[in-house]
Image (tube, rainbow, N blue to C red):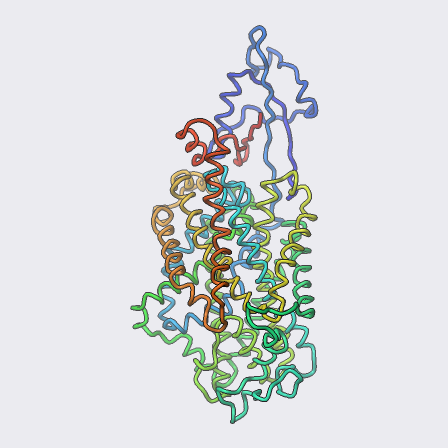
Amino acid sequence: MERSMERNSMEFGHNAAAANASTATPWGNKESPNNEDDSNEEDGDTATPAKVTDPLAPRLANNERVLVVSVTERHRETWGQKAEFLLAVIGFAVDLGNVWRFPYICYQNGGGAFLVPYCIFLIFGGLPLFYMELALGQFHRCGCISIWKRICPALKGVGYAICLIDIYMGMYYNTIIGWAVYYLFASFTSKLPWTSCDNPWNTQNCMPVTSENFTELATSPAKEFFERRVLESYKSNGLDFMGPVKPTLALCVFGVFVLVYFSLWKGVRSAGKVVWVTALAPYVVLIILLVRGVSLPGADEGIKYYLTPEWHKLKNSKVWIDAASQIFFSLGPGFGTLLALSSYNKFNNNCYRDALITSSINCLTSFLAGFVIFSVLGYMANVQKTSIDKVGLEGPGLVFIVYPEAIATMSGSVFWSIIFFLMLITLGLDSTFGGLEAMITALCDEYPRVIGRRRELFVLLLLAFIFLCALPTMTYGGVVLVNFLNVYGPGLAILFVVFVEAAGVFWFYGVDRFSADVEQMLGAKPGIFWRICWTYISPVFLLTIFIFSILGYKEMLGEEFYYPPWSIQVGWAVTCSSVLCIPMYMIYKFFFASKGKCQERLQQSFKPDVTCGSVVPGQQGTSV
């Protein structure tokens, strides 16, 4: 990230230097003794002692040496408009999961009754963590690696773990967007290719869903188009033999990476312009699809099925775990994105209000998407003369098979298909922007001279590296790997990483100190509700989700694909590759990057680094 630095030269005796060092901490609240610019910044090494007439200059004894201190005030690029930041956060939080996961788990776990645990975990678990990350990024104004020097240096491995998780996510998430791009181009025709069974890729079992003879043994044209035309998964044997890369699919994914590059290469200057389209377009399309959906025959039955509460299901612990997991993965704390995006805010921006607005919009969007999906599922159940539970699918199958299937039966199907897949692409792009920006910001801030000054080149090389790593997901068996990476990449590891992050901020850095930081930005200290949530409820919330996810990892993998025993071992190795960054860096910090006795090393490892420059406006960091 481009950062301009203004340097001043000041001279102090050794006593004055020691006194000034204590005011350079980011949690201090005192003004620097001298904020004036020095026109001779290039002559700092040859500066002469200040005149005695200067009231700030210390009196020097004979033969006393002068310590020259370079005072640096930190400058950082900011969002062009407040709306750009809000749209970027909303775009990251509102992703494909809001469309294909929330409606499914809502009706599966009690319909309207599911909203009770969902809202409880939003208030006591998700929202406090969401607020925490926005406040942390805005106050410390740096990415998920550098920020730990100011909080708890030993936990810097959390930042590297997040970067690795973001790479894993980029390897498969962009491939899913590539599927949507494939569908989009396939929609530019007079007749959608998944409407009939007379295509070269269709089998003898293919039968239109509108046929009276359609049975469970038959396959729909939409299902065969996805599996046999888009993926061609029948040419592979799962993870044992994935086959070669499919060129047309690889070209679609490459196009996604090109879009991502030109959205991120200039930082918030380019991303801030793109989010006006990628964050707002999905809402326009959702509203259009909602109006169309509720006008279809059978839509009312689908919506009833979606909302009818089944209160007895609240006795099942799985419903509460699903609600907690959905809130966590929907809001997205811990991926470093909220830290990165808020770090470009102005220091006194009201991040508390931003947290309430963006998290509420995210949850309401999930609720709205449920109406869009279930109105169409009710319509399809009406067309097929069957029950809704036999129509719906979770995950990619819902948006790449069931919904296209419904679109193909509507009048003006080409138009509906084009806008639907445009919506999926924009939903996905916003989220991949956020995940990659988190890693880019973190590395540019941590290595400003090597990476930060060459952001455009670094982003190009990073995306090229991720694209090459993602090539296996574009093979004929790539869909299995996509699901595999979704579980073992970020799925399990991020829960542990965010728990450690919360523990580092709330227990090591301290809720009181963190609340004082928020007070400096907003002028008011967070209330007792937030402090209790941060100290007790949110960490327990994270630990509970992590434990139950570990116990139920087989359920997360699903039963659709076969995973050989060796792949499970590889999966746990992938999970551990990011998680182990945390203890490995703690060992490095204690034994190799700290000095002194054991107690002194612990102090240096778990207490904020006082040599870091101040982030408070009007203060300046010092570097000797």
Locate the N terminus by quadrant.
top right
Identity of the residue drawn at 65% across and 62% down:
256
Up-down relation of residue 318 to residue 303 (above or below):
above
Identity of the residue drawn at 45% across and 26% down:
596
Q: Is residue 288 visible?
A: yes
Q: Nearer the viewer, residue 138 or 83?
A: 138
Residue 457: image location, x then y, percent = 70, 48
Residue 465: image location, x then y, percent = 65, 54
Locate the C terminus by quadrant.
top right
Residue 550: image location, x then y, percent = 40, 59
Q: Is residue 151 visible?
A: no
Residue 386: image location, x then y, percent = 45, 87
Q: Nearer the viewer, residue 243 or 205?
A: 243
Residue at the extreme bottom of the image, as rendered: 212
Total of numbered circles in the picture?
Answer: 0
Q: Nearer the viewer, residue 33 or 239?
A: 239
Answer with left or right where residue 524 lies relative to residue 452.
left
Identity of the residue drawn at 43% across and 36% down:
606
Up-down relation of residue 619 to residue 225 (above or below):
above
Up-down relation of residue 410 to residue 478 (above or below):
below
Answer with left or right where residue 460 lies relative to residue 72.
right
Residue at the extreme top of the image, as rendered: 62
